[in-house]
Amino acid sequence: MEQSTNLSALGRRADARRRTLRAFTYLGLSLWAVLVLFPFYWMVLTSFKSYAAYNGEHIPVLYTLSPTLENYRQAFTAVPLGRYLLNTLIFALVTTALMVAVSTLAAYAFARLSFRGKDLVFGLFLSMMMIPSELVVITNFVTITDLDLRNSFPGLILPSITSVFYIYLLKENFEQVPDELYRAAKVDGTSDLKYLWKVLIPICRPTLVTITILKIIECWNSYVWPRLITDDQAYFLVSNGIQEIRENGFGRENIPAMMAAVVVISVPLILLFLAFRRKIMEGVSRGGMKG
């Protein structure tokens, strides 16, 4: 009886320690979430403050009693923000579609096809990840300028239609599919492209969805290349638009209007990530597993 009582006491103390640890874990995660989300909250809050109210705050106020949508009206009238959003949408969708097609075919070749020097070529291909992106930007700029593609969608899109990292991720994912499926398909007379379309792509859909979403986000946030290759406002993306807003739109002092423009630009990406967050996590985890 005494031993049973001691075991019960030990069990209660262990449960108490687990609950305490869980409470501290949730508290720490909550504080971290507040720190991470506060900049976004401040951005949204500022976008609803009037210019006079914002400049009249000697001490920042974490709420507003008189929200206004005037800043959002200015975001679309002071500069052609709608055009910037349309240009970015076209750039993101076309670039992502081409990149997924190119990366899928390249990954399939490295994962399933046999050709002389495949390992050497793939090793050299991976070594390109070690090259600083700034060096590639210089080379791409010279090439696009020589082709007279500045201030055009092809000039914006072409340097971004391949990715060594995404090819590597897809190759690792394709290699997880059993070789028996490929040999059985070849026995049945299935072509490589049909096997890729009918077997590998459906099996590896989570990784493909992940790559698609991450590429869209990358294109939406792209700044250096669009800023370098375009000086015609008709081809500005939202990244260029932010700078244009700051310099020639509202002026450097109208922070609430600038925050409204930033909110408009940020919301599509946030909604996209929230809608597909599980697919992203699943695709990344599948791409990193072997066996």
Image (cartoon, rainbow, N blue to C red):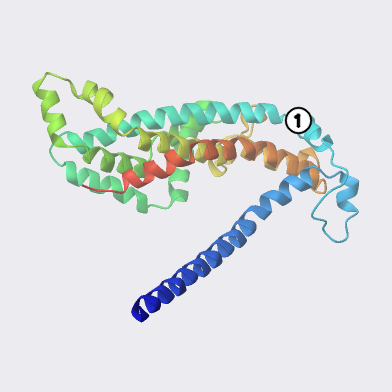
At x 86%, y 43%, the residue is 50
In the image: residue 71, left or right of residue 171? right
Residue drawn at the location 77% of the way across and 43% of the way down: 47
Q: What residue sits right under mark 1 in the picture?
A: 76
Q: Is residue 149 visible?
A: no
In x, y percent, where is residue 52? 91, 47
- Res 209 → quadrant: top left
Residue at x-position 50% and y-position 28%? 93
**Residue 254: percent from the left, percent from the top?**
82, 45
Q: Indicate the quadrant containing the N terminus: top left, top right, bottom left or bottom right.
A: bottom left
Q: From this viewpoint, which residue is outermost toward the left? A: 187
- In x, y percent, where is residue 257? 79, 41
Regarding residue 120, the answer to whether it shows in the image is: yes
Q: Which amino acid does the dot numbered 1 rest on?
A: Phe
For the point 57% across and 42% down, the residue is: 223
| Depth check, front residue: 101 or 67 | 67
In the image: residue 247, left or right of residue 267: right
Q: Residue 110 vs residue 67: left or right? A: left
Q: As displayed, is residue 236 above or below residue 280? A: above
Q: Which of 166/237 is in front? A: 166
The x, y position of residue 175, in whole percent, is 22, 40
Judging depth in this view, the residue of 75 and 266 nearest the camera is: 266
